[in-house]
Structures are given as structure tokens and as C-alpha cells.
Image: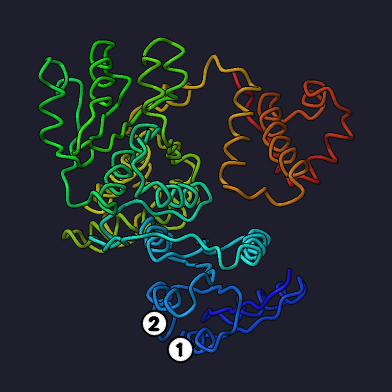
Amino acid sequence: MDGTVLVADDDRTIRTVLTQALTRAGCKVHATSSLTTLMRWVGEGKGDVVISDVVMPDGNGLEMLPKISQDRPGLPVIVISAQNTIMTAIQAAEAEAYDYLPKPFDLPDLMKRTARALENRNRAPRRDDPVENADGPDELPLVGKTAAMQALYRLVARVMNTDLPVLICGESGTGKSLIARAIHDFSDRRTLPFVTANATDLSELEGPARLLARVKGGTLLLDEITDFDDEIQARIVRMMDVPGEHVPRFMATSQGDLSQAMEAGRVRQDLYYRLGGATITVPSLRERVEDIALLTDHFLQRAERDGAPKRWLSKEATELFRQYSWPGNVRQLENAVRRLSLTSRAEEITRPEVETVLGNQPDTGPILRGGEGEKLGTSVARHLRRYFDLHGNMLPPPGLYTRILREVEAPLIEIALDATGGNQAKCADLLGINRNTLRKKITDLDIRVTRRRKLM
């Protein structure tokens, strides 16, 4: 890399790590813990790229972006932040940040983005008519620091002010409607109506006309599009094709893969292609386990604001939350936390109290069996494609082959050990490998070997 990078972060360790990494890559680096110093450097014409934290001792990094854009048009600014909410991503996009990464960030990923920014200097993306934020992050339970959620935030920010139809897919309780509402509330259409339509609203011939009159060029959300029968879907197609000055933005939600629903004949092909402008897949809670503690704290704080006593989870209770499958996703988690905030006997919520609440939850079987009938190769390909998609236009870090094999190998051996009751000889035979090879893999992969219950 060739250029000068300005780094602003109040964490000395981060400044040191970035300075060393960027210097080794061939860059000149100026690092500071002060936004005032950063803005002075920018005003003096220093720097080809800026990497800035959001929360600084003397101000907010996002609030400095308009001034940087005014003083140095085209200077790329990469925002890094520990505030892992959808609001941060939206604010960064609206403030014309070149890129946004959550903390803790992946250093190789940040280096690649910095290299790209240096290559594209003076061609930073621009937005017109920035949106004023109507709500704070506390009003949106769309929080998460995992790669899946951060990729979702960036996609929401990109599609927010386009006119493309948006299809939002995900399991029940993941927050699909919240995503749709967030896109509307922070878009150019935020002053216009947001209307949610179900099959009943379109069951009569006059239904489409009434909906268009209600939405008045705002946003029309078609809730669970696969629940609409063929006749209603045909009406939606005609409604989407109606020209006019006040055409609404169309969004739709779906619990399943809409392409599979089309192949199964449950969704019309013409409707599928009309809704396919942009697709947002909301991850299940099982796919973002690292966010469970963050969400739990968020819901406990919200319950406290609503009048519940101050509560927190014990370490053992938190671990049980992480191990649970959460078939109802974030909505189920919120309900469980609210109940615990009211029924817990002390400030610290214990594991037995969590066991009692989760023991009364619906059976997880139907959810966990949702993938039956799908070939193993198809399932693996779907997860691998998602992993690549999470990196946007960037490639994953090097060493992918070894990482993927390790991710597959470890659970395969653990499950095989479970199935054979912990008998390594039987497990090796089941896997078709030498027993010594199995022992070595158990050691290399740090698999804990205990006497396991044989699966039936």
C-alpha cells in the first residue's frame, strides 16, 4: 500500500496495532486519541485515508464526517465502532463514510478495506439528502456484533434510499418486520405512510386500490408473502405494475426461501421476479450465538426502564442461554428475559430459574427438523455461500480451505463419538480412519473426550 493513513482512536492498543500493521504494509501513519488533532491534520491536507472510532473523549467521530467531506471532498473515512447497532451502520452510511466495521474488527479485513480506499481515493461514494435520525438505537432491538448482523446492517444502509423492492427472509421471530420498518423510517419516504398488508386486505377486488390510497407513495409491506393464494398474488403483480406519480415502495417478508416456494408452486414466478430487487436474509439466533448476551442485556435494561427491578444473568444462566436453540429467535428471547426480570427472586438470575422458564417453552423439534429432505451437499453449499456473502465485495481471509475443513471435522468427530458412546475404536471404524489418526485429530482439534451417551 502507498499513502498516508490518519488513525483516530482513544484505545492506545488499537492505535499501536494499526500503526504497526499499516507501516509494515508501506503506509505512513499519523495516530491520535483526539478528534481535534485529527481535524487539524485533515485541514492541513494531511492523509489519504482516515480510520476513526466513533466515541472519542472530545467528540463523536460520525459528527465529524460532514466537516471532513466539506474540507476534503473525496477523502475516504473508514469508521470503526464498538456500538454494534443498526443505527451505527445507518448513521455511518448517511454521513457518507467510505466504510464501516464493528469492533472487535478483523485486522486483515480492515487492511484490505484500507488498501481499497487508497486505490479509490477521490472516488469515495456519495449520498444526497442525508436522513435525519428519528430514533435512538435504544428504540431498535436490532443489535449485534457478529459478522452476520454487521453484514445485514451494511446491506440495510445500502438499499435504504433506493426504490428497489426488498424481500426480507428469515425464521419467525428474527425481526423481519423491524428491518422493514427501519428501512422505511430512515429512508427518503419516512414522512409518508408505512402500511402492512396481509391476505385479508387483498381478498376483495377493491383491495389493491384501497391499499394504494392508504400508502400514498410510502412503503407497502406484504407480510408473509407465501400465505397469499394465487389469485391474491396476481392482484399484487397488477398492483406493482400500476404506473403513477405516487407509486409506493414494495417490501415483502417470507419465513422460507422464496425461490424454493416458487419451484414448489406456492409463489407465482412473475411475483417472485418483481420482488427480487434486493434480498435481505435475517439470521436466526442460532446463527449469531455471540449476540445472545448483548441482546439479553438490552432486554433487561429495557425491562428496567419499564419498571421492572434491575436484573442480570449469572455466568451459568448466560451459558444456558447460549446453549438453547431458540426456535422463536429474538422474540422468544425477549419474552423469556421479560419473564425472568419479573419473577427472579434476586438481582442475579440463576441457572435453575432459566431452566424453569425455558422448560415451559415450545418443543424445538419442528424448527430443528426444518432442513429435512435437503441434501448434505446443498446444505453445506448454502452455508459456504452465506460465508462468502458476509464479506461483501471482499474475499475471505487467506487459509479458507484449512478453516472450513476444521469447522466441519471437529463437529463430525464429536457427533460420531456421541453416536458410539465415546468408544474410540467404534468411532474410528464408523469414520473409516485409523484409531491413531482419530486420537491425533482429537488432540489437534482440542476435542474433550468424556464417556458419552450413545445416541438412539
Q: Determine crowd level at label 1: few under 14, some 14-19, many 20+ residues with C-alpha closer than 10 A.
A: some
Q: Position of residue 60 (x, y in %)?
A: 39, 77
Name the N-terminal-most of marks 1 and 2: 1
* Local SS, label 2: strand
Q: Nearer the viewer, residue 38 or 282?
A: 38
**Quarter of the image holding residue 135?**
bottom left
41 lies above or below 359: below
* Local SS, label 1: helix
Amino acid bearing label 2: Gly
Which residue lies at the image location 49% right of the left edge and 42% below the top edge?
323
Q: On the rendered structure, is 75 left or right of 56?
A: right
Q: On the rendered structure, is 233 left or right of 111?
A: left
Q: Which residue is mark 1?
A: 36
Q: Position of residue 413 (x, y in %)?
A: 72, 32
**Quarter of the image holding residue 401?**
top right
Compute the Cα span from label 1 to label 2: 8 Å
4 lies above or below 240: below
Q: Are marks 1 and 2 in contact (CB under 8 Å)?
A: yes
Q: Which residue is mark 2?
A: 59
Q: How is the image coloured?
A: rainbow
Amino acid bearing label 1: Thr
Q: On the rendered structure, is 44 left or right of 226?
A: right
